[in-house]
Image: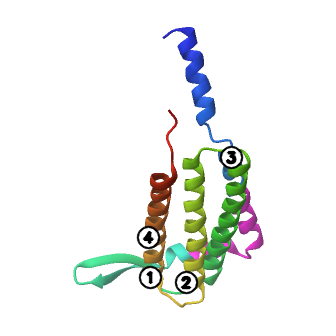
Amino acid sequence: MTATEKSIGKEKRREEWDRLSLVLAGFFLALVGVILMITPNYYDEAVAFVKDFKIVEVSPNITLVAPMSNHPVVYRAVAQFCFAFGILQIAILGLRFLFKDPFKRKAGTIASIIFWLGAGYVSTLLLTQTIGWFAFLSGLLAFIGLWLVVRNLLVLVFFKPSK
């Protein structure tokens, strides 16, 4: 490989690098820290949550693990995290338009907004005991699937490859 080819390769990698990924990573860590700080007795609650898991037969010959009781402190912390991260995704989407990021990244961020706000919603339903543990997991799976569908449909419909 010649020096020119190496230089072009480095330039292309720089263009492909997501400038906002470090912002997201830093916010993720800061948000985890803040949620742990503002949630009273979180460590003990998290340990109790993990210890509360038991094997449950959900159907003949099908067993899964589930907590045996409600853990509102843990569920509230998860919901707060999801909503805060979803709101950050909205801000990141605005920055993506401002920085003229590629459409694929914008599509991924739009899908992430849907996922994080949806995960916050189902976490709130679990917190208020409107749904149970397995409905919560089903809701998360539905929002993961929705994330995949939205992102890929946006790319298929609106993405114009550069020539």
Provide residue 79's location: percent of width, then percent of height: 63, 75
- Binning the other alpha carbons within 10 Å of mark 3 as few (below 14), some (14 to 19) or many (20 upward) gives some
Instruction: Name the residue beneath numbered marker 2.
Output: 126
Residue 22 — which label? none
Q: CA distance from mark 2 to mark 3?
A: 32 Å
Asked whether residue 46 is drawn in magenta, I would say yes
Point out the frontmost of discs 2 and 3.
3
Mark 3: secondary structure: loop
Query: Residue 118, located in which quarter of the rendered image?
Result: bottom right
Q: Indicate the position of residue 69 as horizontal and vertical percent values.
A: 51, 87
Q: Please, what secondary structure does the residue beneath circle 1 have?
A: helix
Q: Callout 4 environment at 10 Å: few (<14), some (14 to 19), or many (20+)?
A: some
Q: How many marks?
A: 4
- Judging by the rendered image, the residue that carries numbered circle 1 is 135
Tell me the element at label 2: helix
Which circle marks residue 20 in the picture? 3
Camera-nearest residue between 39 and 158? 158
The reply to whether discs 2 and 1 touch (Cβ–Cβ < 8 Å) is yes
Disc 1 or 4, which lies upstream in sequence? 1
Residue range corresponding to the magenta coloring:
30-48
Tell me: residue 141, above or below residue 69: above
Q: Which of the two discs, 2 and 4, labels the residue nearer the N terminus?
A: 2
* Scheme of colours in the image: rainbow
Tell me which label, 3 or 4, sits earlier in the chain: 3
Q: Earlier in the sequence, mark 1 or mark 3?
A: 3
